[in-house]
């Protein structure tokens, strides 16, 4: 199967300020995104996500290395014929209406007038902007511009979508809408590559993730492996009767992470689950949640940056990238 996106030792150095000081934004990125895959690209602010995306879109040139879209080098504009793109800060001519904008973009794509009209109506409906179809973009909120950007990215019925923080600026309903669109697109066999800071979106939408730390690729693989490190630690939250104290039971030997009124949250190993739950029930308590302990995105970034930042490698096993 051919790849939708491939990069080999992709690197970018910017020149900054009057002294043209070199800033290394990306170093030796090796990625391969398969067709039909939803791939999340994560990393702290300034990690190099948008730099990578801009190189793929031909907006800036790599200093070293190569990148391909559907096996065509990104330096060939034809590589992007079947690609839809949402930039990090979508910005449109604000004197236009959504219908006029989509007409302009469709014309630039040499689409037929009738097709543009049909697609525009369909896409504005999809992103819940039908009511605003004839209103000037000038009066749009950030979330409305973002949703319009997604409609614009879908106009040419692309096989590959490259979205730089598609959920940015969206309210919960807007995020749900975009998540649904991404799922539908994947069902249609499209490939989606998107950057984000929202862990929930990565967990629920992505087949694989790539993690960048200060321009270095630290991990490519399943998000589960990255967030649920080996060690089999769990967290249990229990509701206990008044006057109860952990020390009275086996739970006293566990690590208490937090306690609020009648709720207690402990860290425990898989082997301790059975005796702990029995002790809770015997004491007249109830189990509220029991789940594998996972790292937060912050912890993951700190871990990857702190431990491996200087060495440039990760101890997370990285399945086929
Ligand atoms: N045009 C530019 N000139 C100089 N330096 C730049 C330029 N664009 C980006 N950089 C630098 O390159 C690094 C990577 O930036 P990039 O925008 O790719 O990060 P990002 O991962 O997209 O961050 P964010 O999550 O904040 O969007 C940063 O240190 C940034 O300051
Ligand atoms: Mg960015």
Image (spheres, grey):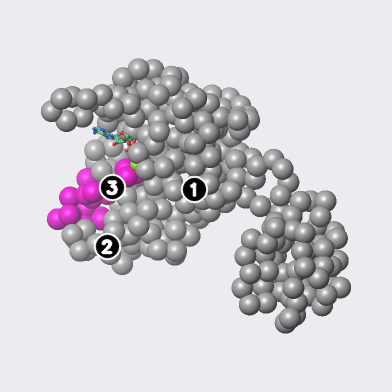
Looking at this view, is 39 or 314 the one in front? Answer: 314
Q: Which mark is residue 312?
A: none
Question: Would you say residue 90 sits in the magenta stretch?
Answer: yes
| Residue lying at 37% horizontally and 27% vertically, measured from the top left | 26
N-terminal of the pair, mark 1 or mark 3, is 3
Which residue carries the number 3 mark? 89
**Viewport quadrant of the C terminus:** top right
Relative vertical location of residue 280 with respect to residue 95 in this rendering, above or below? below
Q: Nearer the viewer, residue 309 or 140?
A: 309
Crowdedness near tag 1: few (<14), some (14–19) or many (≥20) residues, C-alpha within 10 Å: few
Which element is circle 1 on? helix
| Crowd around label 3: few <14 · some 14–19 · many ≥20 (10 Å) | some
Which residue is disc 1 drawn over? 298
Relative to 247, say whether 152 is above or below.
Answer: above
- Image spot of residue 114 (x, y percent): 30, 48
Q: CA distance from mark 3 to mark 2?
A: 13 Å
Q: Circle 2 is placed at which residue position? A: 141
Q: Give the alpha-carbon distance from disc 2 to disc 1, as whole Å.
A: 29 Å
Queried whether the magenta region covers residue 63, the answer comes back as: no
SS class, disc 3: loop
Q: Is residue 266 left or right of residue 101?
A: right
Mark 2 and mark 1 lie on one chain; the one further toward the N terminus is 2
Residue 125 appears in view:
no
Query: Which residue is situated farthest in the bottom direction here?
Result: 242
Q: Give the quarter of the image for residue 53.
A: top left
Q: Position of residue 15 (x, y in %)?
A: 22, 26
**Residue nearest the observer in this picture, 205 or 279:** 279
Query: Please, what secondary structure does the residue beneath circle 2 have?
Result: loop
Q: Identify the residue shown where x is 58% and y is 48%.
A: 295
Please report the bounds of the magenta region as a residue range: 80-104
Ligand 1 under 8 Å from disc 2 Cβ: no
Mark 2 surroundings: few (<14), some (14-19) or many (≥20) residues within 10 A: few
């Amino acid at each position: 199967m051919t790849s939708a996106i491939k990069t080999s030792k992709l690197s970018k150095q910017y020149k900054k300020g009057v002294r043209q000081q070199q800033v290394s934004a990306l170093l030796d990125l090796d990625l391969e995104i398969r067709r039909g895959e939803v791939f999340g690209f994560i990393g702290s602010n300034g990690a190099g996500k948008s730099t990578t995306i801009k190189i793929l879109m031909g907006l800036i040139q790599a200093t070293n290395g190569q990148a391909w879209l559907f096996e065509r080098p990104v330096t060939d504009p034809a590589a992007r014929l079947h690609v839809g793109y949402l930039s990090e800060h979508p910005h449109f001519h604000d004197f236009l209406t959504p219908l006029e904008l989509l007409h302009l973009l469709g014309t630039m794509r040499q689409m037929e007038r009738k097709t543009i009209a049909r697609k525009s109506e369909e896409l504005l409906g999809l992103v819940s902007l039908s009511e605003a179809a004839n209103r000037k973009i000038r009066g749009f909120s950030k979330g409305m511009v973002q949703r319009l950007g997604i409609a614009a990215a879908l106009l040419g019925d692309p096989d590959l979508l490259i979205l730089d923080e598609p959920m940015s600026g969206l309210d919960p309903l807007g995020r749900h809408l975009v998540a649904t669109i991404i799922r539908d697109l994947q069902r249609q066999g499209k490939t989606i590559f998107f950057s984000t800071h929202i862990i929930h979106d990565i967990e629920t939408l992505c087949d694989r993730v790539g993690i960048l730390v200060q321009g270095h690729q630290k991990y490519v693989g399943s998000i589960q492996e990255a967030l649920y490190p080996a060690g089999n630690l769990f967290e249990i939250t229990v509701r206990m009767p008044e006057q109860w104290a952990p020390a009275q039971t086996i739970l006293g030997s566990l690590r208490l992470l937090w306690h609020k009124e009648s709720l207690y949250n402990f860290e425990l190993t898989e082997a301790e689950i059975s005796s702990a739950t029995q002790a809770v029930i015997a004491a007249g308590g109830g189990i509220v949640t029991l789940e594998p302990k996972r790292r937060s995105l912050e912890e993951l970034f700190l871990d990857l940056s702190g431990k491996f930042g200087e060495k440039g490698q990760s101890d997370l096993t990285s399945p086929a990238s």
